Amino acid sequence: MADDWEYAYFNSLSHNGAEDSDGDDRSDGEEYRAGTSPVSGESVLRVFTLRRSGAAGVQVLWAAVPGKIYGIQRRDSLADAAWQDVGSVRALTSTADWTDVDPSVFGQRYYRVFVME
């Protein structure tokens, strides 16, 4: 974590990034990488909605930090051993989205979004 970020949120340099200062199940280090606040449990990287995008597929919409690059992964079953990388998006505003245009999207499918950089 950058010292200036740590000092801005904690008024000290005593955090190592492993703590979860706001109790939202994300470490302070993960919050730093995601661009979310480590002192507000309401500030988290989360998918807002999944919605059909006409005949084109399913749109995934999430809270974002402008300039961050997010990866999108999917799998068809929770029993699948691995997630499949399906795209990446650089956020331009406080929300970002990606549309799954795979024709098999109309079955059951799971998505996750993560910060790449």
Image (tube, grey):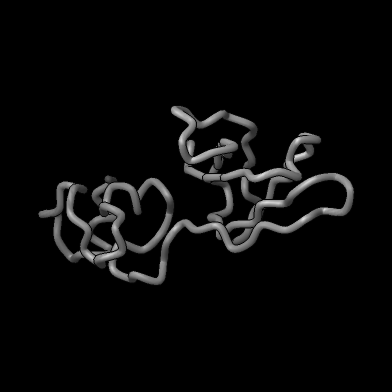
Q: Residue at x 56, y 60 (%)?
A: 63
Q: Residue furthest right?
A: 55
- As drawn, 66 above or below 116: below
- As drawn, 7 above or below 90: below
Q: Can see residue 29?
A: yes
Please give the count of numbered marks on the rendered protein: 0
Q: Nearer the viewer, residue 97 or 76?
A: 76
Q: Can see residue 74?
A: no
- As drawn, 97 above or below 69: below
**Location of residue 47 by image quarter:** bottom right
**Location of residue 76 by image quarter:** top right
Give residue 68's position: percent from left, percent from top: 53, 45
Give residue 93's position: percent from left, percent from top: 64, 58
- As drawn, 52 above or below 77: below
Give residue 57's position: percent from left, percent from top: 79, 45
In the shown orientation, is residue 60 left or right of residue 33? right
